[in-house]
């Protein structure tokens, strides 16, 4: 298994998959939460535009 881990990566998306599987430090946030926060910010900005037109 050690040989396969150090093998050069092919020029395809397999390298990206391997990159994102590596553990990194920092916050871990589920994609659903990120999408929910983004949707809430978009909704709030639209409501503010409707309530306070410029």
Image (cartoon, rainbow, N blue to C red):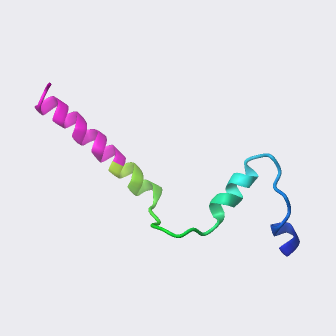
Query: Horizontally, is 17 left or right of 33 in the view?
Result: right
Q: Position of residue 45 (x, y in %)?
A: 24, 38
Query: Does 23 sit left or right of 39 as displayed?
Result: right
Residue 47 painted magenta: yes
Q: Residue at x 71, y 60 (%)?
A: 18
Pinpoint residue 48: horizontal percent, then vertical percent. 17, 36
Q: Residue at x 77, y 46 (%)?
A: 12
Q: Nearer the viewer, residue 35 or 49?
A: 49
Labels in figure, total:
0
For residue 4, above or below residue 9: below
Q: Is residue 1 visible?
A: no
Residue lying furthest top: 54
Q: What residue is shown at x 45% (from left), y 67% (from top)?
A: 27
Q: Where is residue 38 in the image (x, y as percent from the top left)?
A: 35, 46
Magenta stretch, overall SS: helix
> What residue occupies the far bottom of the structure in this picture?
2
Image x and y of residue 47, in percent: 19, 36
Q: In which quarter of the image is the C terminus?
A: top left
In which image quadrant can residue 23 be found? bottom right
7 on left or right of 50 = right
Asked if one can make out residue 32 in the rendered structure from this viewpoint, the answer is: yes
Range shown magenta: 38-54
Q: Residue reaching furthest right?
A: 3
Please say if 51 is above or below 35: above
Rendered-image quadrant of the N terminus: bottom right
Q: Looking at the rendering, which quadrant does residue 2 occupy?
A: bottom right
Horizontally, residue 18 falls left or right of residue 49, namely: right
């Amino acid at each position: 298994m050690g040989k396969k881990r150090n093998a050069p990566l092919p020029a395809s998306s397999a390298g990206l998959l391997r990159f994102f599987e590596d553990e990194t430090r920092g916050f871990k946030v589920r994609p659903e939460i990120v999408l929910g926060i983004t949707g809430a910010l978009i909704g709030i900005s639209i409501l503010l535009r409707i309530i306070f037109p410029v």
